[in-house]
Amino acid sequence: MVKTTAAIAALLLSTPAFAGWEPSKPVEIVVAAGAGGASDQMARMMQAAIQKNNLMKQPMVVSLKGGASGAEALIYMLPLSAKIPFNWRDLTPVSVIALDQFVLWDNASGPKTVKEFIEAAKAASAPFKMGGTGSKREDHVLTVFMEQKTGAKFSYLPYKSGGEAATQLVGGHTESNVNNPSENLEVWRAGQVRALCVFDKERISYKTKVTETQSWNDIPTCKEEGLDLQYLMLRAMFLPGKVTQEQQAFYADLFQKVTQTAEYKDYMEKQALKPIFLTGKDMVEFLEDDDKLNASLMNAAGFVAK
Protein backbone atom coordinates (compact mmCIF):
# COMPACT_ATOMS: atom_id res chain seq x y z
CA MET A 1 0.00 0.00 0.00
CA VAL A 2 1.21 3.50 -0.85
CA LYS A 3 -0.09 6.03 1.63
CA THR A 4 0.82 9.70 1.57
CA THR A 5 -0.49 13.21 1.68
CA ALA A 6 1.30 14.88 -1.20
CA ALA A 7 2.27 18.17 0.34
CA ILE A 8 2.14 20.52 -2.60
CA ALA A 9 2.08 24.29 -2.36
CA ALA A 10 -1.16 24.35 -4.26
CA LEU A 11 -1.49 28.05 -3.57
CA LEU A 12 1.27 30.56 -2.95
CA LEU A 13 0.54 33.95 -1.48
CA SER A 14 2.51 37.02 -2.42
CA THR A 15 1.99 40.40 -0.83
CA PRO A 16 3.66 43.57 -2.17
CA ALA A 17 3.78 45.77 0.93
CA PHE A 18 2.59 46.15 4.50
CA ALA A 19 1.72 49.09 6.72
CA GLY A 20 1.17 48.24 10.36
CA TRP A 21 -0.38 44.82 10.67
CA GLU A 22 -2.39 44.90 7.44
CA PRO A 23 -1.41 45.07 3.76
CA SER A 24 -1.40 48.54 2.26
CA LYS A 25 -1.63 47.38 -1.36
CA PRO A 26 -3.66 44.74 -3.24
CA VAL A 27 -2.69 41.20 -2.26
CA GLU A 28 -1.91 38.59 -4.90
CA ILE A 29 -2.67 34.87 -4.64
CA VAL A 30 -0.21 33.14 -6.94
CA VAL A 31 -1.60 29.80 -8.13
CA ALA A 32 0.87 27.15 -9.28
CA ALA A 33 -1.51 25.77 -11.90
CA GLY A 34 -3.35 26.62 -15.09
CA ALA A 35 -6.81 28.08 -15.60
CA GLY A 36 -9.79 25.93 -14.70
CA GLY A 37 -7.98 23.53 -12.38
CA ALA A 38 -8.85 22.84 -8.76
CA SER A 39 -6.27 25.29 -7.38
CA ASP A 40 -7.54 28.06 -9.63
CA GLN A 41 -11.13 27.39 -8.57
CA MET A 42 -10.27 27.38 -4.89
CA ALA A 43 -8.28 30.60 -5.08
CA ARG A 44 -11.23 32.36 -6.68
CA MET A 45 -13.58 31.00 -4.02
CA MET A 46 -11.35 32.47 -1.30
CA GLN A 47 -11.06 35.75 -3.19
CA ALA A 48 -14.87 35.96 -3.31
CA ALA A 49 -15.29 34.94 0.34
CA ILE A 50 -12.82 37.55 1.55
CA GLN A 51 -14.47 40.29 -0.50
CA LYS A 52 -18.08 39.35 0.29
CA ASN A 53 -17.47 39.05 4.03
CA ASN A 54 -15.20 42.11 4.25
CA LEU A 55 -12.38 40.11 5.81
CA MET A 56 -9.64 42.40 4.49
CA LYS A 57 -9.52 46.08 3.54
CA GLN A 58 -7.33 45.64 0.47
CA PRO A 59 -8.54 43.79 -2.63
CA MET A 60 -7.21 40.34 -3.46
CA VAL A 61 -6.30 39.26 -6.99
CA VAL A 62 -5.53 35.82 -8.42
CA SER A 63 -2.54 35.22 -10.71
CA LEU A 64 -2.04 31.92 -12.53
CA LYS A 65 1.55 30.72 -12.78
CA GLY A 66 1.21 27.23 -14.21
CA GLY A 67 4.07 27.41 -16.69
CA ALA A 68 6.94 24.93 -16.60
CA SER A 69 4.84 22.47 -14.60
CA GLY A 70 4.30 25.12 -11.94
CA ALA A 71 7.92 26.28 -11.74
CA GLU A 72 6.82 29.91 -12.04
CA ALA A 73 5.18 29.66 -8.65
CA LEU A 74 7.61 27.33 -6.80
CA ILE A 75 5.58 24.16 -6.23
CA TYR A 76 6.46 21.54 -3.71
CA MET A 77 7.66 18.62 -5.82
CA LEU A 78 9.59 20.58 -8.42
CA PRO A 79 12.78 21.05 -6.34
CA LEU A 80 13.08 17.24 -6.16
CA SER A 81 12.38 16.54 -9.84
CA ALA A 82 14.33 19.46 -11.31
CA LYS A 83 17.09 19.82 -8.71
CA ILE A 84 16.17 23.43 -8.02
CA PRO A 85 18.04 24.72 -4.95
CA PHE A 86 14.97 25.75 -2.95
CA ASN A 87 11.79 24.28 -1.48
CA TRP A 88 8.88 25.21 0.79
CA ARG A 89 11.30 25.99 3.64
CA ASP A 90 12.35 29.10 1.72
CA LEU A 91 8.78 30.35 2.08
CA THR A 92 6.76 31.21 5.18
CA PRO A 93 4.05 28.62 5.96
CA VAL A 94 0.71 30.24 6.76
CA SER A 95 -1.99 27.57 6.83
CA VAL A 96 -3.27 24.28 5.46
CA ILE A 97 -6.89 24.90 4.49
CA ALA A 98 -8.09 21.69 2.79
CA LEU A 99 -7.20 18.16 1.72
CA ASP A 100 -7.95 17.05 -1.81
CA GLN A 101 -8.50 13.49 -2.97
CA PHE A 102 -7.67 11.90 -6.30
CA VAL A 103 -10.18 9.84 -8.25
CA LEU A 104 -9.54 7.33 -11.02
CA TRP A 105 -11.76 8.38 -13.94
CA ASP A 106 -12.42 6.83 -17.32
CA ASN A 107 -14.70 7.72 -20.20
CA ALA A 108 -18.36 6.82 -19.68
CA SER A 109 -18.07 4.42 -22.62
CA GLY A 110 -15.05 2.68 -21.07
CA PRO A 111 -14.72 -0.07 -18.44
CA LYS A 112 -17.27 0.08 -15.63
CA THR A 113 -15.13 -1.13 -12.73
CA VAL A 114 -11.52 -0.85 -11.57
CA LYS A 115 -11.00 -4.55 -12.26
CA GLU A 116 -12.29 -4.21 -15.83
CA PHE A 117 -10.19 -1.07 -16.32
CA ILE A 118 -6.96 -2.74 -15.20
CA GLU A 119 -7.68 -5.84 -17.27
CA ALA A 120 -8.33 -3.68 -20.34
CA ALA A 121 -5.13 -1.71 -19.76
CA LYS A 122 -3.11 -4.92 -19.50
CA ALA A 123 -4.69 -6.38 -22.63
CA ALA A 124 -4.29 -3.23 -24.75
CA SER A 125 -1.80 -3.33 -27.63
CA ALA A 126 -0.48 0.10 -26.60
CA PRO A 127 -0.27 1.66 -23.12
CA PHE A 128 -3.46 3.36 -21.95
CA LYS A 129 -3.13 7.16 -22.15
CA MET A 130 -3.37 8.78 -18.72
CA GLY A 131 -3.97 12.53 -18.70
CA GLY A 132 -2.59 14.69 -15.93
CA THR A 133 -1.42 18.15 -14.93
CA GLY A 134 2.34 18.29 -15.21
CA SER A 135 5.25 15.93 -15.65
CA LYS A 136 6.75 14.46 -12.48
CA ARG A 137 4.04 15.96 -10.31
CA GLU A 138 1.37 14.29 -8.20
CA ASP A 139 -0.73 12.94 -11.11
CA HIS A 140 2.36 11.46 -12.72
CA VAL A 141 3.62 9.94 -9.46
CA LEU A 142 0.25 8.33 -8.85
CA THR A 143 0.25 6.92 -12.39
CA VAL A 144 3.66 5.33 -11.85
CA PHE A 145 2.50 3.72 -8.62
CA MET A 146 -0.59 2.38 -10.36
CA GLU A 147 1.73 0.74 -12.88
CA GLN A 148 3.86 -0.76 -10.14
CA LYS A 149 0.83 -1.98 -8.20
CA THR A 150 -1.10 -3.50 -11.12
CA GLY A 151 1.42 -4.37 -13.82
CA ALA A 152 -0.60 -2.33 -16.34
CA LYS A 153 1.22 0.18 -18.55
CA PHE A 154 0.20 3.80 -18.99
CA SER A 155 1.44 6.57 -21.26
CA TYR A 156 1.32 9.72 -19.16
CA LEU A 157 0.30 12.89 -21.03
CA PRO A 158 0.74 16.18 -19.12
CA TYR A 159 -1.71 19.00 -19.78
CA LYS A 160 -1.88 22.60 -18.63
CA SER A 161 -4.70 22.04 -16.15
CA GLY A 162 -7.13 19.51 -14.75
CA GLY A 163 -9.82 21.11 -16.89
CA GLU A 164 -7.86 20.33 -20.04
CA ALA A 165 -7.20 16.76 -18.85
CA ALA A 166 -10.95 16.35 -18.37
CA THR A 167 -11.67 17.63 -21.87
CA GLN A 168 -9.17 15.21 -23.37
CA LEU A 169 -10.83 12.31 -21.56
CA VAL A 170 -14.30 13.30 -22.72
CA GLY A 171 -13.02 13.55 -26.29
CA GLY A 172 -11.54 10.07 -26.17
CA HIS A 173 -7.97 11.33 -26.60
CA THR A 174 -7.02 9.63 -23.32
CA GLU A 175 -8.40 6.54 -21.58
CA SER A 176 -8.24 7.90 -18.06
CA ASN A 177 -7.09 10.57 -15.62
CA VAL A 178 -6.67 10.87 -11.87
CA ASN A 179 -8.17 14.34 -11.53
CA ASN A 180 -9.29 15.78 -8.22
CA PRO A 181 -13.09 15.61 -7.82
CA SER A 182 -13.67 19.27 -8.68
CA GLU A 183 -11.70 19.04 -11.93
CA ASN A 184 -14.07 16.42 -13.37
CA LEU A 185 -17.22 17.59 -11.64
CA GLU A 186 -19.09 19.04 -14.62
CA VAL A 187 -18.24 16.23 -17.05
CA TRP A 188 -19.19 13.66 -14.39
CA ARG A 189 -22.49 15.44 -13.81
CA ALA A 190 -23.04 15.44 -17.59
CA GLY A 191 -22.54 11.67 -17.73
CA GLN A 192 -19.44 11.92 -19.90
CA VAL A 193 -16.97 10.28 -17.50
CA ARG A 194 -17.16 7.55 -14.86
CA ALA A 195 -15.69 7.72 -11.35
CA LEU A 196 -14.09 4.31 -10.74
CA CYS A 197 -12.60 4.81 -7.27
CA VAL A 198 -11.12 7.35 -4.86
CA PHE A 199 -7.51 7.04 -3.67
CA ASP A 200 -8.24 7.41 0.05
CA LYS A 201 -8.68 5.15 3.06
CA GLU A 202 -12.31 6.18 3.33
CA ARG A 203 -15.04 7.27 0.96
CA ILE A 204 -15.73 10.94 0.32
CA SER A 205 -18.20 11.94 3.02
CA TYR A 206 -20.73 14.00 1.06
CA LYS A 207 -24.00 12.16 0.36
CA THR A 208 -26.01 14.71 -1.63
CA LYS A 209 -26.60 13.48 -5.19
CA VAL A 210 -24.24 15.09 -7.70
CA THR A 211 -25.32 13.16 -10.77
CA GLU A 212 -28.79 11.74 -11.35
CA THR A 213 -27.83 8.56 -9.52
CA GLN A 214 -24.63 9.16 -7.52
CA SER A 215 -23.23 11.22 -4.68
CA TRP A 216 -19.53 11.59 -3.96
CA ASN A 217 -20.02 9.05 -1.18
CA ASP A 218 -21.17 6.45 -3.71
CA ILE A 219 -17.69 6.30 -5.25
CA PRO A 220 -15.87 3.30 -3.72
CA THR A 221 -12.35 3.57 -2.40
CA CYS A 222 -9.72 2.05 -4.65
CA LYS A 223 -8.90 -0.38 -1.85
CA GLU A 224 -12.51 -1.60 -1.88
CA GLU A 225 -12.03 -2.29 -5.59
CA GLY A 226 -8.79 -4.23 -5.10
CA LEU A 227 -6.34 -1.38 -5.82
CA ASP A 228 -4.72 -0.60 -2.48
CA LEU A 229 -3.41 2.92 -3.11
CA GLN A 230 -4.03 6.00 -0.98
CA TYR A 231 -2.94 9.47 -2.05
CA LEU A 232 -4.04 12.90 -0.80
CA MET A 233 -2.98 16.42 -1.67
CA LEU A 234 -3.03 19.33 0.68
CA ARG A 235 -4.04 22.86 -0.27
CA ALA A 236 -1.89 25.32 1.61
CA MET A 237 -1.04 29.00 1.78
CA PHE A 238 2.47 30.41 1.97
CA LEU A 239 4.01 33.87 2.14
CA PRO A 240 7.41 34.79 0.73
CA GLY A 241 10.35 34.23 3.05
CA LYS A 242 11.56 36.79 5.57
CA VAL A 243 8.22 38.26 6.55
CA THR A 244 7.44 39.36 10.10
CA GLN A 245 5.56 37.29 12.65
CA GLU A 246 2.82 39.94 12.61
CA GLN A 247 2.39 39.54 8.85
CA GLN A 248 2.29 35.76 9.15
CA ALA A 249 -0.26 36.00 11.97
CA PHE A 250 -2.44 38.38 9.96
CA TYR A 251 -2.78 35.88 7.11
CA ALA A 252 -3.22 32.87 9.39
CA ASP A 253 -6.11 34.71 11.04
CA LEU A 254 -7.49 35.76 7.65
CA PHE A 255 -7.62 32.23 6.27
CA GLN A 256 -9.03 30.83 9.49
CA LYS A 257 -11.88 33.32 9.05
CA VAL A 258 -12.26 32.14 5.44
CA THR A 259 -12.78 28.54 6.67
CA GLN A 260 -15.69 29.76 8.77
CA THR A 261 -17.55 31.40 5.89
CA ALA A 262 -20.57 29.96 4.13
CA GLU A 263 -18.65 30.19 0.85
CA TYR A 264 -15.89 27.92 2.14
CA LYS A 265 -18.28 25.35 3.63
CA ASP A 266 -20.39 25.27 0.48
CA TYR A 267 -17.30 24.94 -1.70
CA MET A 268 -15.91 22.08 0.41
CA GLU A 269 -19.06 20.04 -0.19
CA LYS A 270 -19.59 20.91 -3.84
CA GLN A 271 -15.96 20.21 -4.72
CA ALA A 272 -15.68 17.21 -2.40
CA LEU A 273 -12.75 18.58 -0.40
CA LYS A 274 -11.88 17.61 3.17
CA PRO A 275 -12.06 20.64 5.47
CA ILE A 276 -8.99 21.15 7.66
CA PHE A 277 -7.11 24.04 9.24
CA LEU A 278 -3.50 23.81 10.36
CA THR A 279 -1.09 26.63 11.12
CA GLY A 280 2.08 27.28 13.08
CA LYS A 281 3.90 24.29 14.55
CA ASP A 282 1.19 21.84 13.50
CA MET A 283 1.52 22.88 9.86
CA VAL A 284 5.30 22.69 9.88
CA GLU A 285 5.24 19.20 11.41
CA PHE A 286 2.70 18.15 8.80
CA LEU A 287 4.93 19.47 5.99
CA GLU A 288 8.03 17.82 7.43
CA ASP A 289 6.30 14.43 7.58
CA ASP A 290 5.07 14.80 4.01
CA ASP A 291 8.50 15.90 2.88
CA LYS A 292 9.92 12.55 3.95
CA LEU A 293 7.09 10.62 2.32
CA ASN A 294 7.32 12.55 -0.93
CA ALA A 295 11.08 12.10 -1.14
CA SER A 296 10.58 8.36 -0.73
CA LEU A 297 7.84 8.24 -3.40
CA MET A 298 9.72 10.43 -5.87
CA ASN A 299 12.84 8.29 -5.46
CA ALA A 300 10.86 5.10 -5.97
CA ALA A 301 9.27 6.56 -9.11
CA GLY A 302 12.69 7.57 -10.45
CA PHE A 303 11.76 11.25 -10.61
CA VAL A 304 14.46 12.73 -8.36
CA ALA A 305 17.07 14.67 -10.32
CA LYS A 306 20.60 13.37 -9.86
Image: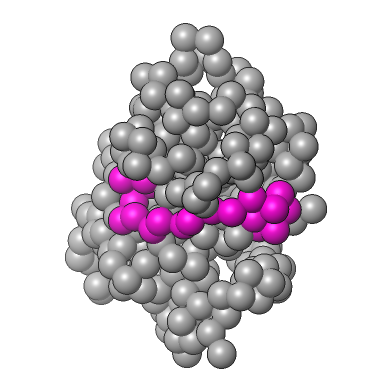
Furthest residue in direction front, as rendered: 125
Q: Is residue 147 magenta?
A: yes
Q: Position of residue 37 (x, y in %)?
A: 35, 47
Closer to the camera in the image, 103 or 244: 103
Q: Residue at x 47, y 74 (%)?
A: 78
Expressed as whole percent of the image width and height from the top left, the position of residue 56 reads: 31, 51
The image position of residue 185, as x and y in percent, is 42, 30
**Chain part drawn in magenta:** 145-166
Res 21 quadrant in image: bottom left
Which of the pair 78/127 is nearer the observer? 127
**Above/below status of 304 relative to 116:** below
Residue at x-position 49% and y-position 34%: 106
Q: Nearer the viewer, residue 145 or 281?
A: 145
In the displayed structure, would residue 177 be above or below residue 254?
above
Q: Is residue 186 magenta?
A: no
Q: How many dots with numbers?
A: 0
Q: As rendered, which of 55 and 157 lies closer to the eye?
A: 157
Q: Residue at x 51, y 36 (%)?
A: 105
Answer whether residue 265 is visible to the viewer in this image.
no
Q: Is residue 209 visible?
A: yes
Determine the image quadrant of residue 182.
top left
Quarter that holds the C terminus: bottom right
In the rendered image of this protein, does residue 208 appear above or below residue 96? above
Check the image and tell me how it is coloured. Answer: one colour
Residue at the image position 31 percent from the left and 56 percent from the top: 160
